[in-house]
Image: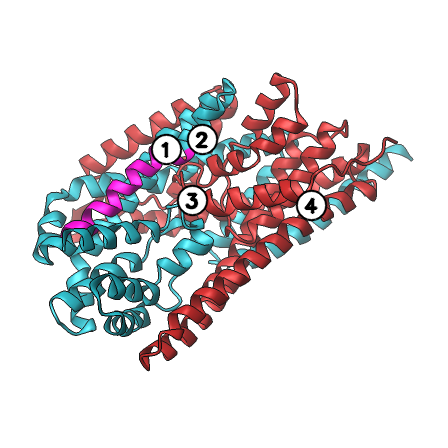
Amino acid sequence: MAAIPRSVTKKELLSAMLRWMFFQTSCWSWERMQNVAWCWHLIPLLKRFYPKPEDLRAALKRHLVFYNTEPTLSQAVSGVVISLEEQRAAGAEVPDETINAVKTGLMGPLAAIGDSLLASATNAVLLSIGMGIALQGNILGPIIFFVSWTAIIIALSWYLINAGYNAGLDLAEAGLLTGRRIEQLTEIMTVLGMSVIGALSATYIGLTTKLQWTFQQQTTSLQSILDGILPKLLALLLVALLWWLHQFRNWSILRLLGLTVVVGAVGAVVGIF
Amino acid sequence: MLIKALLIAAVAYLGWLPTPWFGGVPIGWYTLGRPLIAGTIVGAILGDIQTGMIVGATINAFYIGAITPGGAMAADMNMAGYVGTALAILAKVKPEVAVAMAVPIGLVGTFGWQAFSTLSVFWVHRADKHAEDLNFRGLTWDLMGGPQILNFLLRFVPVFLVVYFGAPIAEQMASLIPDWLTHILTVIGSMLPAVGFAVLIKMMYRRNVVMLAYFAIGFVLVAVGKMPMVAVAMLGLALAGLHWFFRSSAFAREVS
């Protein structure tokens, strides 16, 4: 077995950490959320890993799929993915699906944990302390909040991206990135990833219908009937339709987007949605 | 006053959710975006740090614990902090009144976010093309050029106008945005994640048809069970363990 490469320097990890920390929401869209920033923050490393243009192109496209999670905890995912890409470039058989499954499986739980632990709890506690001091007219209030929060975020980000990278190396050293083992790892992460996508579909796709009719002074809304069948049924139908067109009719993402925008706009104007 | 209003609007832009330049969401949005910090800075710009800080802390109390999970904008606390404090100091009203005055401008802010997160889909697709062409300058522009010009206009302009011309202009601005436009953007925004998920499902489906079953389980747990994401992930891991166990025992039977 070839030696396991560990070529990523602290400087490169720091650069990836900062690129993500600053820009992760810079091109945030409802379609793929943090995807452009995710791809962009890996560019220097991917360029080094993949000298051949066709490999680099494939790597960039691999990282332009949907991604969204809590920005700071996401640094751990960055670390793992950097390590997986490094192993892949060095010849380990890490398929696209493994990298996708790892990202997708981790993003859901990390978003939930991060939003509650970091954003709600830690930020709110520090903020309350700062507000208490500020209301007494003491300028230390905002300063203490700002300094403590920023220090925690920078230290945690640095710890997480390193921990993630080392975890990826541990996977490689334990022989989990070869042959049947990587098959199993991918399979497991895909199961987790698919349940996360299912859960996110029910969370993010908020499509409802406004259609209703009146019969003998009884007004019935279509949405309440649909909710009786399955809440969020329209979200499920929409994602199923788009997936079917993409999978079996070879529709490009651009066509899927066009269809969604047209149906949404027309539906909103004529009062269906 | 012109310069002060420009400065306040510029800091409001720096502390706004999608703005990268002050440490992105982890630092900029979670510090400059909080009314406590916003109030202190507005106070410093207007020459009364003490009042600004106290007004900011008071406004912040309304928003404590508010977060933006997955980009859902419940309350525009950036707008409330910057505009609210500025109005409180300039019009010499109580913080509570200043927040109420900032509500119409909050509508403009929410519209701005909805417009940004829907229109930035344009650069997402440009990025697909630039990745294909290995155009790294293009990719960088798609991330921080185009979207940030849009984002700057949507945040800087309304904050500046209200701080400079006073609260009444907020209602005029809000009335300039037609309801049907807001509605269309909201509907399209609520449908767009389906495009991203459809592509992900195709990639994972390639492995194994049975993966659709796990999608269905995750969907129903949240749609019907309203289950929190960490619980879904725990069940997902448990399912993954079972999946692995039964797959490998089926495999063992096949070879024996």
Left or right of B142? Residue A105 is right
Chain in cyan (letter): B
Residue for badge 1? B145
Pinpoint the chain carrying mark 3: A
Question: Would residue B157 be counted in the magenta stretch?
Answer: yes
| 2 vs 4, front mark | 2
Query: Does residue A149 belong to the magenta stretch?
Result: no
Mainly helix, strand or loop, the magenta region? helix
State the quadrant of the N terminus of chain A.
Answer: top right
Q: Position of residue B44 (x, y in %)?
A: 27, 64
In this image, A253 relative to A83: left or right?
left
Q: Secondary structure at mark 3?
A: loop
Q: Which residue is mark 4?
A: A165
Pair 1/3: label in front: 1
Q: Is residue B74 above or below residue A22?
A: below
Residue behind mark 3: A25
The answer to whether marks 4 and 1 mark residues whose Cβ atoms lie closer than 8 Å is no
Depth order, front residue of A86/B246 = A86
Q: Secondary structure at mark 4?
A: helix
Specify which label sits upstream in the sequence, 1 or 2. Answer: 2
